[in-house]
Amino acid sequence: MSEPMGPFALRWPRTLARALLPCSCALCGELASDAVCAPCTLRYTGPDGPRCPRCANPLDPSEMEGQTCAGCMSEAPAFDATVVASDYAAPLDGLVLGLKFGARLPLAPWFAGRIRDVVLAQPGWRLPDLLCPVPLGPRRLAERGFNQALEIARPLSAMLGVHLQPRLAMRAIETAAQSGVAPRERAGNIRGAFALAPGMAALIEGRHVGVVDDVMTSGHTLNELAATLKAAGAARVSNLVFARTPPHQGA
């Protein structure tokens, strides 16, 4: 009977491939060991000022770091916290579009790594008990061939040591893409769009669920999914997102 492979045996093919086939940075074009080189990663991601711990929008100068923003205080969302790795702005917006619409799947682990870095940098931030990618509807999944949120959630799960439940939630309604809907109509467009998959209620009862997505714009999609999870028994829902659209651009 053969011995099970250890961690190094599982990692060495990828390590060897990176050594023999270095890639080009998706931003500057220089040789890199990852999808984006270390200098570009340092330049374009990382701390960029205080954000609301609930929705991750930048805080006004009058608001103190760690304070919930005025918008969340006046109308609290269903989710409890949000962490983001960057703003949805040039040049990183091009990478997001490249993953979502150009099937540049090697970008997904790099996105996951940036989310991990931000999560682990949060003082006292409690990791979720399980991760749930924002689900796509059957038609859009068939058109695209993959779910970009799931592609990010897979490596993020391994990086954080948090169990991934890829089929926890599903699209109950095939809605129009939020990006093509007027901002004032987005809440109505996504209302009732999600449902817990059959047999999954026991997995989230009283637990902390981390919802993974590539971009957060208005927050209506994540809010609707969080409300669905809370109604099914989740005690806490946190969003783990790569990019946040600045308020003046989106919502």
Image: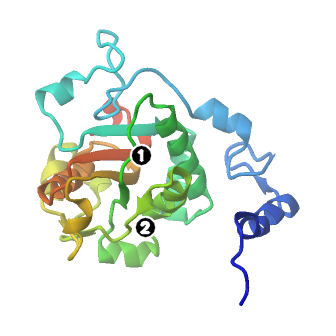
Identify the mark at residue 241; answer none if there is no mark.
1
Q: Residue at x 57, y 40 (%)?
A: 91
- Asked whether, in this view, residue 52 is left or right of residue 85, the answer is left
Residue 189 percent across, percent down from the top left: 16, 57
- Which image quadrant for residue 77? top left
Q: Quadrant of the N terminus?
A: bottom right
What is the secondary structure assignment of the residue under circle 1?
Answer: strand
Task: Quickly name the residue at label 2.
Answer: 147
In depth, the one of 126 and 94 nearer the eye is 126
Residue 89 appears anywhere in the view? no
Q: Quadrant of the C terminus?
A: top left
Q: Residue at x 20, y 53 (%)?
A: 206
Outermost residue, bottom direction? 1
- Which image quadrant for residue 84? top left
Q: Callout 1 environment at 10 Å: few (<14), some (14 to 19), or many (20+)?
A: many
The amino acid type found where label 2 is placed reads: Asn
Q: How many marks?
A: 2
- Asked whether, in this view, residue 127 is left or right of residue 35, the answer is left
Q: Residue at x 29, y 35 (%)?
A: 55
Q: Are marks 2 and 1 in contact (CB under 8 Å)?
A: no
The Cα–Cα distance between marks 2 and 1, rounded to whole angstroms, is 14 Å
The amino acid type found where label 1 is placed reads: Val
The vertical placement of 212 against 52, above or below, is below
What is the secondary structure assignment of the residue under circle 2?
Answer: loop
Residue 136 percent across, percent down from the top left: 33, 67
The vertical placement of 173 against 182, above or below, is below
Q: Callout 2 environment at 10 Å: few (<14), some (14 to 19), or many (20+)?
A: many
Which mark is first along the chain, 1 or 2? 2
